[in-house]
Amino acid sequence: MTLRSSIGLAALTALLTFAAAGCSRDSGTLEPWPPNTDPIVFEDRFTGLVEFYAFGNSQLDALSVQTAEQYDGSTCLRIRVPAPGGKYAGGAFVASQQRDLSGYTALTFWAKASRAVKLKEAGFGNDNAGTTRYVAGSSGLQITTTYKKYAIPIPLPSKLTAERGLFFFSAEPQDASGYDIYIDEVKFENLLTVTNPRPVMTTRTVNTFVGAVTSAKGTRVTFNVEGTDLLVNHSPVYFTYASSDSSVATVADEVIRVIGPGTATISAKLDTAAVTGTMTLNAGEFTPGLAPTPIVPAGKVISIFSNAYANRYVDKWSADWDDADVTDLQIYGNDMKLYTNLVFAAIEFTSQPVDATAMTHFHMDIWIPTGTLFKVKLVDFGPDGVYNKPPSASDDKESQLAFTSVSTPPLVAGTWLGLEVPLANFTALTTRAHLAQIVIEGNPSSVYVDNIYFHK
């Protein structure tokens, strides 16, 4: 499942705002203001302020409220999903006031469709602020032509004491034509039929360095919901982690920090339940040092990643469909990215594309231990914000450069190399007003990356 959050999402526009009569606080009382435990997301009566934000590059008018096809009451939500070749439908309902949802065990809703389809994903915890922590959801829910109730369990309800991300969904074109999904009665409930949690994280070995900051991957829980197993994918912060050697790695607030050389095994629990899977960290001293500090004036730069500038928002540093692992490093206060097991990696900023029309150069600093080939591709999605591999779509453009021992600049291992390239060298990139991806690949299995920016 793709978790569109910090896994990811920018609020393009608030399409719908729902408000009901609020209540005022008695200024004469000294008692604490009670937390908002309102469970309702969408119903015929709204108890608070909820806004809907369409996901980046989605069909902005896909969602509407209508007075037909409802499950109960007088209205329901209609999601109009376009035919193949168009955009997808997706977005998040966000509360203006934080809600305490710790007393509930699941998000529930009723849904049906104009024909049998699969809902790509649905869940909660996406607040559209770029700082989302507690994203959770399920993929591939089968929606039929008659209303059915769906329940998505909360991995650990005690985490949701101040949540604004109430409900998100994503639906993609399927088969040959578009379709409608109807959703009604969206709310949080305390279901006694949510039982038997079986938490898992991906078992893996990570070769890393002192100074690295990393996290678990593939965090998920299988619940029994009314007699049927349901998989809930979620962000790593629902788990509590422990290190076998605190001189090598420490854990604080679910962040795993490598502080010394050696080997440590990271295990986890979901509340009191042991998580299946571990992460083994093999840590060595960090040898590359720091990349040179950029000197281009900030006013001439559009920065994707650098401590020297204010950076643009990035959805994914390693796309769901690529073949690489990425680790965040912080060395002597400087942030950088380490790509390992690299076949190819896609850096995606599709929700907030970059207009580099006025820029003249692309810059990226890399450090490779070995290797004879490194490639960089820039991809422009065009005005529609949807990728269709060129030349099948006239408004999508991409161009790739290869760096070797005889290129300009030449590829050199064992030292920081500044790839300072005129954008004109990306000859097939005839438009760059909607840049949305940077793809790297080559034969070094590991590469350190810093200072990615466009400039003039």
Image (cartoon, helix red, strand yellow):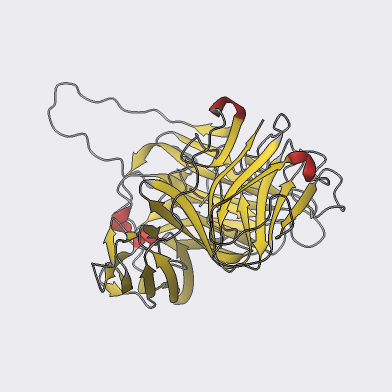
Residue 77 placement (x, y as % from top left): 59, 45
Residue shown at 33%/51% (left/top)? Answer: 160
Q: Residue furthest left?
A: 30
Whether residue 360 sits left or right of residue 260 in the image: it is: right
Dividing the picture into quarters, in which one does residue 358 lie? top right
Q: Quadrant of the N terminus?
A: bottom right
Whether residue 441 sits left or right of residue 366 in the image: it is: right
Q: Nearer the viewer, residue 161 or 348?
A: 348
Task: Examine the rendered structure and indicate whether residue 107 appears above or below residue 300.
Answer: below
Q: Nearer the viewer, residue 9 or 136?
A: 9
Q: Quadrant of the C terminus?
A: top right
Residue shown at 71%/39% (left/top)? Answer: 434
Task: Examine the rendered structure and indicate whether residue 360 appears above or below residue 162.
Answer: above
Dividing the picture into quarters, in which one does residue 444 lie? bottom right
Whether residue 162 sits left or right of residue 232 in the image: it is: left
Q: Nearer the viewer, residue 114 or 258?
A: 258
Residue shown at 73%/32% (left/top)? Answer: 357
Task: Examine the rendered structure and indicate whether residue 237 appears above or below residue 445.
Answer: above
Residue 152 placement (x, y as % from top left): 46, 62
Is residue 296 something that shows in the picture? yes
Q: Nearer the viewer, residue 81 or 46?
A: 81
Is residue 226 something that shows in the picture? no
Task: Examine the rendered structure and indicate whether residue 309 appears above or below residue 327.
Answer: above
Q: Residue furthest top?
A: 27
Residue 400 placement (x, y as % from top left): 76, 53
Residue shown at 21%/34% (left/top)? Answer: 33
Residue 9 placement (x, y as % from top left): 55, 45
